[in-house]
Image: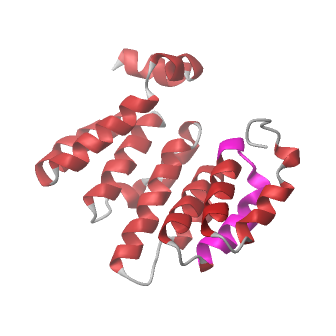
Amino acid sequence: LENIDRKDLMHPVRKLTTAPWPRIRLRACRVLATVGDTGAVPDLKKLAASEQDPKVLHSALRALARLAPAEALPLLKGATPAEDELRASAAAEGLGDAPGPAVAAHLATLLDHPAPGVRSRAIAAAVLSGQLDALARLDQLHAASPSDAFESLALMGRKLGPAALRENRELAAALAAD
C-alpha cells in the first residue's frame, strides 16, 4: 500500500497501529507518515499516548509530528527524562520530514531543549523548513556536543541533495541567496 501511495487505501494500515506485534505497529506508522495520511492522526495520537515499545513510540510520534505537528507537541512529556528525550527527538525528526515552512512555529521548544540530540534534530528541521537563521545555533551545539552538531549537518545533507532541492525551489532559492 505504501508503494501505491493512495491515502484513500490507508484504512487497513490505520488498523495495524493496534496490532499486537511491535514490528507491525512500527511499520504501519512509517507507511502512514510516508503516504501523508492525515486521517491517521487520531490513531497515531492514541498509539503515542499508550505505547510501551520505544521504537514504536518513536515512530508514532515522528509520524504524528510530520502529519500534525500541533497534535504531537502536547505528547512530549514522558514518564522519565529518557522518555522525554525520546519523545522530543522523534517530534524533531518528524518536523524535519514535514513539508515546508508550516513547521516553523512548532520548533521553538525543541530548539531550546536541554538534550543536545534533540537540539541537533530541531536545527536540521528548522533549516529544512527554510529557517536558515537556525544555522547560527550549530556553533553553540558544536561547543557543547560536536557529535550532535555533525549529526545535524548529516541530517540536512541527506535532505538537501540535488533531487530534493529541485522539488523544493523555495528552499533552494533561500540557500542560494544566503
Rendered view: 48 above or below 98 = below
Residue 99 location (% of width, % of height): 59, 38
Q: Residue at x 24, y 40 (%)?
A: 150
Q: Is residue 75 above or below residue 60?
A: below
Q: Is residue 100 a member of the stretch shown in magenta?
A: no
Residue 107, visible in the rendered structure: yes
Q: Position of residue 75 (x, y in %)?
A: 54, 72
The answer to whether 82 is drawn above or below residue 153 in the figure is below
Whether residue 131 is visible, yes or no, is: no
For the magenta stretch, what is the residue range?
34-49
Q: Is residue 39 magenta-colored?
A: yes
Horizontal side, residue 107 vs residue 120: left or right? right
Predominant SS along the magenta part? helix
Query: For the point 53% across and 18% down, which residue is it?
Result: 163
Indicate the quadrant containing the C terminus: top left, top right, bottom left or bottom right: top left
Q: Using residue 81 as the reference point, say whether residue 44 is left or right of it.
A: right
Q: What residue is shown at x 45% (from left), y 31% (from top)? A: 159
